[in-house]
């Protein structure tokens, strides 16, 4: 298949909207990461997403809308707390899971009775949904298992020959995927941390539960609330080891070989004797989130065998960074 690279202009977005309307796939920028979109009301179109990126058939898609009014026909009912979160944090990097309506095809939800919905703030994403005239189902646009794409070039690398088009937009602002909240239980459950933080959610709706799988490997007996949590994720080819504790630089200087790389805080850079990529200040979770996937991809391009990664602080957006790094590392973590 020929993959068109469309400019991020009104004309480019209109062509992309036509492709979606006609049952094709388009990668497009959002404020979180690039998504790979199809018409969310067309089960056959949505099925193509799974084969294009090798996505497991039981890992459901997030449905993107461009106006809050589009929510009601996609779900059976909107729980009060979901309404509060939607009004406070939409448009933005927050996905809400609710009971699905009959309009949502099973190919989107993998047969689950619930659907994940998000109203993005990115102008291109919103314009694309409007131009297509339908809600757009879109997971992150990476090949399954790889770090999520945060630049148009990452999409070109992963998707050329597999999808109809890629919109050549800017680099993504957040750099990690949306926060996912399951709203059908009481208390609601955080399934995936993101730029909308636990602190912000609790300020709006009170205490929530954080799913065990956010920071722990899944035991085989555990019931999985979000199928995506089962899969190895975000992994570069390099082995990633998270190193927790103040002795990070000494540890890396002692153990890293010349083919290895440190993913470090700005404060560490001067003390490191091995090559490094610095993903932000120790206290700057937002910068770390913005850089993490790009740097995991860059580590592979630099031929790193092992990446020794600084363990981020788990407050605020740091929880999202830690969650992604743990998966990239297959939960391999050393505490000094
Ligand atoms: P991605 O956009 O690649 O991050 O994938 C979407 C994520 O949303 C995956 O982790 C899915 O498991 C999760 N997801 C989508 N729909 C649902 C749902 N109905 N229930 C639970 N998790 C969901
Ligand atoms: Mg993904």
Image (cartoon, rainbow, N blue to C red):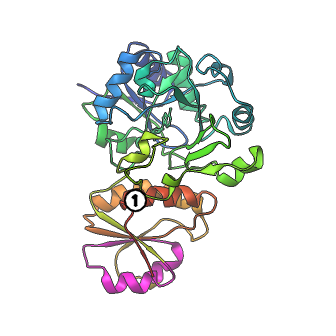
Is 303 one of the magenta-colored residues? no
Q: Quadrant of residue 254?
A: bottom left
- Tell me which residue sits at (46%, 59%) in the image: 216
The one of 281 and 69 positioned closer to us in this rendering: 69
Report if residue 257 lies within the magenta region.
yes
Asked whether, in this view, residue 211 is left or right of residue 221, the answer is right
Residue at 28% of width from left, 29% of height from top?
51
**Which quadrant, please, contains the C terminus?**
bottom left
- Residue at the front extreme of this rendering: 221
* Vertical side of 329 occupied by 53: above or below: above
- The residue carrying pointer 1 sits among few (fewer than 14), some (14 to 19) or many (20 or more) residues within 10 Å by Cα, namely some
Identify the element where label 1 is drawn: helix
Q: Residue 328 in the image: x percent, y percent?
A: 38, 57
Ligand 2's image quarter is top left
Q: Could one spot residue 324 in this view of the protein?
A: yes
Name which residue lies at 66% across and 22% down: 77
Q: Quadrant of residue 25?
A: top left
- According to the picture, the residue beneath numbered tag 1 turns out to be 295
Relative to residue 110, is residue 252 depicted above or below? below
Span shown in magenta: 245-270
Residue 244 drawn at (x, y percent): 47, 75
Residue 263 % position (x, y): 42, 69
Q: Quick check: 287 above or below 171?
A: below
């Amino acid at each position: 298949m020929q993959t068109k690279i469309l400019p991020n202009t009104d004309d480019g977005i209109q062509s992309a909207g036509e492709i979606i309307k006609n049952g094709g796939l388009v990668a497009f920028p959002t404020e979180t990461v690039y998504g790979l979109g199809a018409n969310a009301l067309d089960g056959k179109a949505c099925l193509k997403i799974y084969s294009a990126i090798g996505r497991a058939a039981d890992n459901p898609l997030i449905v993107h809308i461009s106006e809050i009014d589009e929510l009601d026909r996609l779900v059976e009912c909107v729980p009060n707390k979901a309404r509060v979160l939607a009004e406070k944090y939409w448009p933005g990097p927050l996905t809400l899971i609710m009971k699905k309506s009959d309009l949502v095809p099973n190919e989107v939800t993998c047969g689950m009775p619930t659907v994940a919905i998000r109203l993005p703030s990115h102008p291109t994403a919103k314009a694309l949904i409007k131009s297509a005239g339908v809600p757009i189902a879109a997971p992150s646009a990476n090949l399954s298992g790889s770090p999520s794409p945060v630049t148009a070039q990452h999409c070109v690398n992963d998707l050329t020959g597999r999808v109809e088009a890629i919109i050549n937009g800017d680099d993504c602002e957040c750099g990690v995927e949306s926060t996912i909240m399951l709203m059908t239980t009481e208390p609601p459950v955080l399934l995936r941390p993101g730029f909308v933080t636990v602190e912000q959610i609790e300020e709006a709706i009170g205490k929530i539960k954080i799913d065990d799988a956010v920071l722990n490997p899944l035991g085989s007996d555990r019931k999985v609330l979000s199928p995506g949590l089962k899969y190895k994720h975000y992994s570069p080819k390099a082995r990633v080891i998270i190193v927790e504790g103040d002795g990070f630089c000494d540890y890396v200087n002692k153990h890293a070989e010349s083919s290895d790389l440190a993913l470090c805080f700005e404060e560490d850079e001067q003390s490191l004797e091995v090559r490094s990529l610095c993903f932000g200040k120790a206290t700057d979770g937002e910068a770390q989130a913005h850089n993490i996937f790009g740097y995991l991809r860059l580590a592979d391009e630099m031929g790193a065998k092992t990446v020794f990664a600084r363990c981020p602080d788990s407050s605020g957006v740091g929880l999202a960074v830690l969650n992604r790094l743990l998966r990239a590392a297959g939960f391999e973590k050393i505490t000094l």
